Image (cartoon, rainbow, N blue to C red):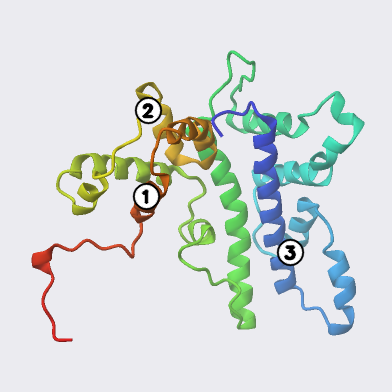
C-alpha cells in the first residue's frame, strides 16, 4: 500500500492476516491438545470460532511464555475485524461509517508509533518504510511464537507439519523471519541496474535487443518502473500497452519472442561453440 487512504486495500490486508494467524492458532491447538477419539466432534466444533484473542489465550494458558501486550492489541483488532467488520458492507450500519477497519488500523499504528496519519484528500500520508517494518515486526512476533510451538509439538509427536519448501512465502516468514517486502524491492532495483550496465556484454541481453521496443511515453517511465514491484501498479499502464499493440503488425511473432525472455529452457549457442559428435 502506498498510503492508508483506500479502505479496500486495508480490508484485503486485514482479511489475509486474520485468516493466516487464525489457521496457525488452530494448528497449534490441534497439535497441543490430546483429544480422545470419542471427543473429536466436540473438539472440532470448539474450533469453529474467529476470535483470535480467545484462541491465543487457549494456547498461552499452558505455555511458560506469553505474547506481548502489543501482540494482544493487534489480535484484538483482528478479532473485531473478522467477527464483525468484514460483513459490515452487507448491513445498513455501513452507511454512516463504511471504513471502520480503516480507522481502527490507522489508530493502532498512531497509538503505538506515536504519530499522526493524515488521510485528507490533498494531504494523504505515505505508508512509510518504518510503518511497514512496525506492522511486519508486530505480525512476525505473533507468527514466530506460534511456529516455535508447532515445531516443538511436531518433534514431540514425531510428525513433520513444520517442514516448509524453500521457494514459498512460508519459508520467507518462518525460516528467514522476513515480515516485509523491502528486500524484494531492493532486488528488482539492483537487477534493473545490472541489466542496464551489462546490456552490451551479455549474450541474452544482446539477443533481447533484437526486437524493436514499443514507443512508450518517456514521461511515464518512472511510474512504469515502479510498476515492476507490484501487479496492482501494472494495471495503470495496461491500457497504454493495448493502444501500442494496436500499431504492431505481427503480434504473434512478437509474443513468441517475448516468451523467450526469462525462459530458463531457452539457450543461446554460437556455431563455433557446438562440437561435432557422432550420431
State which tag comes first along the sequence, 1 or 2: 2
In the picture of the structure, the residue carrying the numbered disc 2 is 221
Q: CA distance from mark 3 to mark 1?
A: 51 Å
In terms of secondary structure, where does tag 3 sit?
A: helix
For discs 3 and 1, the disc positioned in front in the rendered view: 1
* Residue 117: percent from left, percent from top: 61, 23
The image quadrant that residue 49 belongs to is: bottom right
In terms of secondary structure, where does tag 1 sit?
A: helix
**As rendered, which of 26 and 69 lies closer to the eye?**
26
**Measured along the vertical axis of the image, is residue 179 above or below residue 92?**
below
In the picture of the structure, the residue carrying the numbered disc 3 is 26
- The single residue placed furthest to the bottom in the displayed view is 279
**Measured along the vertical axis of the image, is residue 40 above or below residue 247?**
below
At label 2, counting other C-alpha atoms closer than 10 Å, the crowd grade (few under 14, some 14-19, many 20 or more) is few
Q: Quadrant of the C terminus?
A: bottom left
State which tag comes first along the sequence, 3 or 2: 3
Residue at 38% across, 44% down: 250
Residue at 37% across, 29% down: 216
Q: CA distance from mark 3 to mark 2?
A: 46 Å
**Measured along the vertical axis of the image, is residue 116 above or below residue 58?**
above
Q: Quadrant of the N terminus?
A: top right
Direction from residue 27 to residue 138 in the image, left or right:
left
The image quadrant that residue 41 belongs to is: bottom right
Residue at 62% across, 80% down: 156
In the picture of the structure, the residue carrying the numbered disc 1 is 253
State which tag comes first along the sequence, 3 or 1: 3
Amino acid at each position: 500500500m502506498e498510503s492508508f487512504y483506500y479502505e479496500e486495500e486495508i480490508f484485503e490486508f486485514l482479511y489475509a492476516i486474520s485468516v493466516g494467524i487464525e489457521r496457525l492458532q488452530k494448528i497449534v491447538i490441534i497439535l497441543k491438545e490430546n483429544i480422545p477419539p470419542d471427543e473429536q466432534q466436540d473438539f472440532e466444533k470448539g474450533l469453529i470460532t474467529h476470535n483470535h484473542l480467545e484462541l491465543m489465550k487457549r494456547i498461552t494458558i499452558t505455555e511458560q511464555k506469553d505474547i506481548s501486550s502489543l501482540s494482544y492489541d493487534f489480535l484484538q483488532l483482528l478479532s473485531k475485524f473478522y467477527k464483525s467488520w468484514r460483513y459490515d458492507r452487507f448491513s445498513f450500519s455501513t452507511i454512516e461509517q463504511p471504513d471502520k477497519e480503516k480507522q481502527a488500523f490507522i489508530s493502532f499504528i498512531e497509538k503505538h508509533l506515536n504519530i499522526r496519519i493524515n488521510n485528507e484528500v490533498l494531504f494523504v500520508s505515505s505508508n512509510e518504510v518504518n510503518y511497514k517494518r512496525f506492522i511486519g515486526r508486530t505480525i512476525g512476533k505473533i507468527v514466530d511464537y506460534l511456529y516455535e510451538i508447532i515445531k516443538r509439538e511436531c518433534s514431540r509427536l514425531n510428525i513433520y507439519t513444520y517442514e516448509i519448501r524453500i521457494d514459498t512465502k512460508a519459508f520467507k516468514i518462518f525460516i528467514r523471519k522476513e515480515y516485509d517486502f523491502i528486500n524484494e524491492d531492493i532486488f528488482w532495483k539492483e537487477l534493473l541496474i545490472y541489466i542496464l550496465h551489462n546490456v552490451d556484454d551479455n549474450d541474452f541481453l544482446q539477443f533481447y535487443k533484437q526486437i524493436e521496443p514499443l514507443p512508450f511515453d518517456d514521461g511515464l517511465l518512472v511510474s512504469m518502473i515502479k510498476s515492476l514491484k507490484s501487479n496492482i501498479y501494472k494495471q495503470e499502464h495496461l491500457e497504454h500497452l493495448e493502444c501500442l499493440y494496436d500499431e504492431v503488425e505481427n503480434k504473434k511473432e512478437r509474443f513468441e519472442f517475448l516468451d523467450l525472455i526469462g525462459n530458463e529452457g531457452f539457450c543461446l549457442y554460437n556455431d563455433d561453440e557446438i562440437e561435432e559428435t557422432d550420431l
